[in-house]
Amino acid sequence: MSTALNPIVLVEVTSDSSEDYDPSIEEYIVVAHRERRITVHHRRPGQAEDWSATVGVRGGSVEIHSLGTIFDDRRGLPRAR
């Protein structure tokens, strides 16, 4: 099995029915491997330029909008919001 190391780009391939709309991706998540940290980049639907980032660190929590959950490091597992 091969693994993509150090990816630098995320590509969304459109279809005939989606190419006239904003890209559908609303969120991407970066999970650090050296420390307990999750960075969630979230885009408001229909707002191509309106991105925000939230960082969850050891002992904290961060909302993952697209999954309808909150990752709570105190519990170690995602929980429903």
Image (cartoon, rainbow, N blue to C red):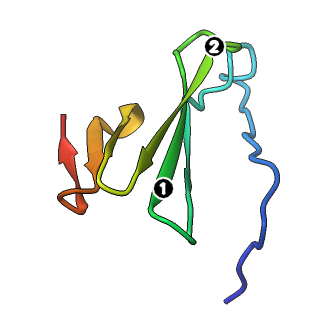
Q: Residue at x 74, y 13 (%)?
A: 20
Q: Which residue is mark 2?
A: 50
Q: Quadrant of the N terminus?
A: bottom right
Which mark is first along the chain, 1 or 2?
A: 1
Under mark 2, the amino acid is: Asp
User: Percent position (x, y) of residue 21?
Assistant: 68, 14
Under mark 1, the amino acid is: Arg
The dot on residue 37 is 1
> Mark 2 near mark 1, Cβ–Cβ under 8 Å?
no
User: Percent position (x, y) of residue 69?
Assistant: 27, 40
Q: Residue at x 21, y 56 (%)?
A: 74
- What is the crowding at mark 1: few (fewer than 14 residues within 10 Å), some, or many (at least 20)? some
Q: Nearer the viewer, residue 11 or 78?
A: 78
User: Percent position (x, y) of residue 11?
Assistant: 77, 44
Examine the rendered structure and indicate whether residue 11 appears above or below residue 68: below
Please give left or right for residue 21 compared with residue 68 in the image.
Answer: right
- Quadrant of the rendered structure where residue 64 is? top left
User: Percent position (x, y) of residue 41?
Assistant: 57, 34
Examine the rendered structure and indicate whether residue 20 appears above or below residue 1: above
Examine the rendered structure and indicate whether residue 19 appears above or below residue 73: above
Q: Residue at x 58, y 10 (%)?
A: 46
- Circle 2 — which element? loop
Q: Nearer the viewer, residue 28 or 59?
A: 59
